[in-house]
Image (cartoon, coloured by chain):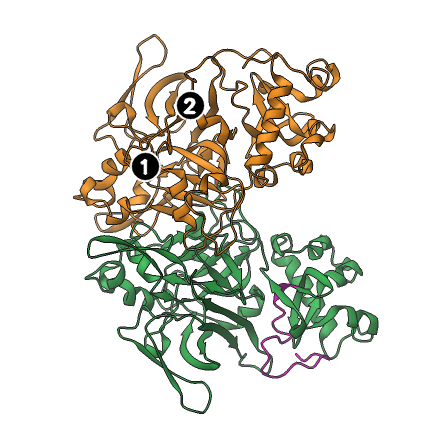
Chain colours: A green, B orange
Amino acid sequence: MASWLHVADDSDFSLRNLPYGVFSTADSGPRIGVAIGEYALDLRVLAQEHVFDDLDFSVATLEEATLNAYAELGRSVHGKVRRKLQQLLEESTQLGDVLRDNQERRTKCLVPLDSVSMHLPVVVGDYTDFFIGIHHANNCADFLKPGSDITGLIPGFWDTPTAYHGRSSSVIVSGTPVRRPKGQYREYGKAVSTLCQKLDFEVEFAAIIGQGNQMGDAIDVDRAEDHIFGFVMLNDWSARDFQKNEPSAPFSCKNFATSISPWIVPFEALEPFRIPPTEAGKEVNSAYEIPIRATLESNSERYQVAECNTKFVVFSFAQMIAHHTRGGCPLRPGDILATGTMSGPTRQELGCFLEHSQPYEMVASGSNGGKIIRTFLEDGDVVEFTAHIQPKDGVGNVGFGLLSGQVLPGN
Amino acid sequence: MASWLHVADDSDFSLRNLPYGVFSTADSGPRIGVAIGEYALDLRVLAQEHVFDDLDFSVATLEEATLNAYAELGRSVHGKVRRKLQQLLEESTQLGDVLRDNQERRTKCLVPLDSVSMHLPVVVGDYTDFFIGIHHANNCADFLKPGSDITGLIPGFWDTPTAYHGRSSSVIVSGTPVRRPKGQYREYGKAVSTLCQKLDFEVEFAAIIGQGNQMGDAIDVDRAEDHIFGFVMLNDWSARDFQKNEPSAPFSCKNFATSISPWIVPFEALEPFRIPPTEAGKEVNSAYEIPIRATLESNSERYQVAECNTKFVVFSFAQMIAHHTRGGCPLRPGDILATGTMSGPTRQELGCFLEHSQPYEMVASGSNGGKIIRTFLEDGDVVEFTAHIQPKDGVGNVGFGLLSGQVLPGN
């Protein structure tokens, strides 16, 4: 499916994607758009100009400054809007007068991506982080419970998706810098107050909830996917020295910052990329096979850190949602459910520094063969995640854009 | 300080209190008020009728359906409004024409409490639960880490206030029933899916944040109290069977429900009730001495469960806030920071059933000498907390109203 707009073959934002985000420009504040090629398509303008009126839904939701209300409308509405947008943008459009040939409207609503600022796409009511990456769990077992390996994981690890509640207020959008946190740990039996010396990243994948559930009502695993609006990448910045001091629950080791990518890839866009989960579970084709690449930039050089994959998980998003709501906990539009680190089995697939057993040497992405060594992150480092998948049948990638954050020195 | 309104000597809502809440009536939706005697005083009406205009603050915040925006204005503004209300309500008022003698306005804004429905007073962005009750920690040590006593608590217990992130979406106001949750635990090496068999309550005390902090900026312990809007009671309903299965972090054992009392007692109202903390810390007079009583109602009989006290803590709210933000985590208006269970040293002071070493026999509050035994909560049980303090100098209690919740059978 090609568009009359030029979309490069390797663009994350093909017509098969159409991810939602919230962007602003110098002349106008935050509004909802979808990414297509090198543009943000301004959905607020299209809504105000009645382009969606024939679809019979609450069009005003597209005029808001966040996606929560639109996300809540559910899969059926999102599907109608998606098809409409594809009809407007496809090369062979029957609706040329609505956008392609309407120069005034095109100028208003096709905004070059290099001129926009991205915002958190949703108001985050709650953020839940899971721990369902099989290799990550194995590699971290000894850190969390010295003397353990994968057989020493908590018994419940295999029964239900392990999770903890994260901090909503420190979820930030890509591009927001992260200041090295102050905190505390214990050394030689004494409490030590310090700037974090073991700052880490974590490569994660997260669902954004669309329709929620009433408190008291569990979501059945067979209906759970209906509650997913779309997906983002997530960097669960971590302070490993503080984490050792917080065995009861992650707190100061996590709540200083969590970053998400700005474009929410719709649930429907990922349907072609489903596979059976790593551990055979109740669901077939309930995991996704999406490589997520992490790089580190230091002194203007970019180094390859890891290639993780969303398939290295032992539960599906449907199971995460069902477990989360089994006791009646309400999910709400905009909630984030993240998988935990999605490390693969080899050294170049480890999704955080913690899992390396020794300082990690990384190769420059460029051709000069430069190398860098890290045990943990240093001030000035820029950590970036990208992820995109090519369909087996033809052209039109589905990608997640860029998730980027720079480490600032502590105060 | 007496009011021209009749306020019973033992009323929670004397002129020294003036707690804020959000209430609605049959004829009008949620709005902000303060409780005085047997009335809610409608602050939206007073704001709309320009009663606060001379105080030079954003009066529109009092016309909202939640207290977040007003709470954010800070101690100086709240103090001005408080003094104005006391001036309007005191027996010797110089402003009689504004309220006392203005029959039309009195009828509009003094709403009998028995005709109102209470709502969550704030939108809860984040809810954090701490674990700083000394007796509770001692009594739970063996449950959390078998073989422990208080010397076996995590080493960090004494360094910084231990905490975990709670679930915001399941915070509910007093009066909302709680359905027995479904969940999972492990028995004889196998996963068991079950309705919770060990449903518990927890007597806690919580601060509601007023002014927040910018992400990246720690709040200094000496300025931390400036960020507190007021206080409520909190019931941290718990599923102990699920909790045993979640050693990594509390999750399904907690996120099915958390209840708060509806009237936020202002920071200033509690100033006369400050004492040094149980464990000598940096702060003097940094704890409060407020008894919180828990009762259980079953088959129309009310039984005495416990008398806890907010003094049995090893850290102050200032320290909780400083620790919470030390790494740059932002607090926002409406955030809840709860202390954890505030058990005292004796059997009749234990703030949850878990801490009892055997089934607990409770005596009826009435005179018929009835008794009831509970190991954990049963369907139909109504758990209620009340708390009030009498000033040493004269009349005028400060109380928290009622925190009530009934256990409904599971689905």
Please tell me how crowded label 2 is: few (under 14), some (14-19), or many (20+) other residues with Cα within 10 Å: many
Q: Above or below — where is A150 with respect to B345?
A: below
Q: Residue at position x 42%, y 20% from top?
A: B389
Res A311 visible = yes
Mainly helix, strand or loop, the magenta region?
loop
Q: Above or below — where is A97 with respect to B52?
A: below
**Measured from the top left, where is residue A393 in percent x and y?**
56, 81
Where residue B277 sits, quadrant-wise, is top left
* Identity, as a three-letter code, of the amino acid under mark 2: Ala
Q: Chain of mark 2?
A: B
Drawn side of residue A381 relative to residue A401, left or right:
left
Where residue A136 sits, quadrant-wise, is bottom left
* SS assignment at label 1: loop
Query: Which residue bears the numbered disc 1?
Result: B197
Q: Chain of mark 1?
A: B
**Measured from the top left, where is residue A286 in percent x and y?**
45, 65
**Measured from the top left, where is residue B242 in percent x and y?**
32, 44
Q: Residue at position x 52%, y 76% from top?
A: A388
Q: Which mark is residue B387?
A: 2
Q: What range is drawn magenta here?
A: A1-23
Q: Residue furthest bottom?
A: A368
